[in-house]
Amino acid sequence: MDMRPVMDIPKEPAVLRVENLQTHFATELGTVRAVDGVDLEIGRGEVVGLVGESGSGKTMAGLSILGLIDPPGRIVGGSVVFDGQDLVGLSERELRSIRGSRISMIFQDPLTTLSPTMRIGRQMMNVIFAHRSMPKAEARRKCRDALDKLGIPSPDERLRSYPHQLSGGMRQRVCIAMAMLNEPSLIIADEPTTALDVTTQAQILEEVRALRRDTGTSFIWVTHDLAVVSELADRIVVMYAGQIVEQGPTDVILEAPSHPYTKGLLDSIPSSNRDARRLPQIPGSAPLAGAEVVGCKFRSRCRLVSKACMERPELMGCGQDRSVRCFHPIAARELACEEAI
């Protein structure tokens, strides 16, 4: 089996290229490698699902891309090249000109984005005014149109409302509208539908698909829910303990997972096709924060562990435009892993 480290390169030109990104936190327990050498590319107009358990590093990776890391955390290595410009090392002023304009972020809890003391219209217009000059009436009209496009009824009335006067689903729609106001090239969405009911979640996913189709905006959709990304994402990137362990086209990953961790995540999803037996779960837990792990970080939980796993695996090409960080890829038995082209 001939396998070499590769990056999974999207077919569309990349709007974002992350190489060997490392974000560390100094703690009393030692150095926490929250993002431990992440390589990632996002094509223009592409939706990439970034998935993993809580604490896998997916949210921290999104924050690191935008430089939203506060002490004691810091980016200690790597590059984040967005539209040809490396964001790592830029001043806070330079980053502010990019955030909310060329790259936007949607947070899991809209109340962390929306101020309870300001009307929705004022908050949305401030997003526009932070990056461009525009008559107030035109800005308000732009905000109204954004709400209307996202299916919010009576948008003029919503602009006059305070956040507490809106439902959770409506607040999240407002946050999505705010993220789209300045027509960014990339939106990082951090579990924006997790706290919503299934019906509202489905509506928002449909609205995101329409926005992507109409605007060509790229998305990094951060979530622990593989069922959500199966409906939305072009590619799936799986993170574990700060590292990418598998990535590839959504249908390929879902039909034939190659990393044991990915298979464990898929096996734990309820399905109407399963019988009434208890769902399997991944044994054990992720490494403790600050713990030094020799070799593969997943080996203590893996049923395929061997002596080879005492060495640190690299991300390898494994057929069908995918890559996997494993010495014993499951798909190798069926797909005959080969060097990626």
Image: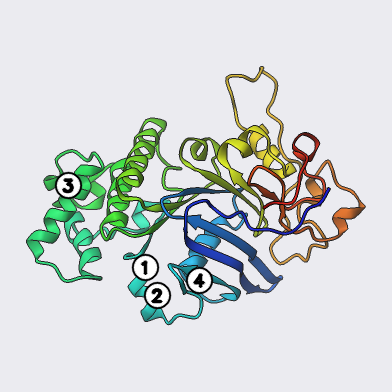
Q: Residue at x 40, y 79 (%)?
A: 92
Q: Residues within 10 Å of mark 4 (few under 14, many from 20)?
A: some
Q: Quadrant of residue 169?
A: top left
Q: Residues within 10 Å of mark 3 (few under 14, many from 20)?
A: many
Q: Amino acid at mark 3?
A: Arg
Of labels 2 and 3, the one closer to you:
2
Q: Residues within 10 Å of mark 2 (few under 14, many from 20)?
A: some
Q: Residue at x 78, y 53 (%)?
A: 3
Instruction: Judge left or right: residue 176 versus residue 66.
Output: left
Label 2, on which residue?
A: 95
Q: CA distance from mark 1 to mark 4?
A: 14 Å
Q: Residue at x 72, y 59 (%)?
A: 5
Label 3, on which residue?
A: 158
**4 or 3: tag closer to the N-terminus:** 4
Q: CA distance from mark 2 to mark 1?
A: 6 Å
Instruction: Judge left or right: residue 317 versus residue 156.
Output: right
Q: Mark 2 and 3 residues: CB-CB less than 8 Å, in contact?
A: no
Of labels 4 and 2, the one closer to you:
2
Label 4, on which residue?
A: 69
**1 or 4: tag closer to the N-terminus:** 4
Q: Mark 2 and 1 residues: CB-CB less than 8 Å, in contact?
A: yes
**3 or 1: tag closer to the N-terminus:** 1
Instruction: Judge left or right: residue 107 versus residue 253.
Output: left
Label 1, on which residue?
A: 99
Secondary structure beneath dot 2 equals helix
Farthest right residue?
Answer: 307
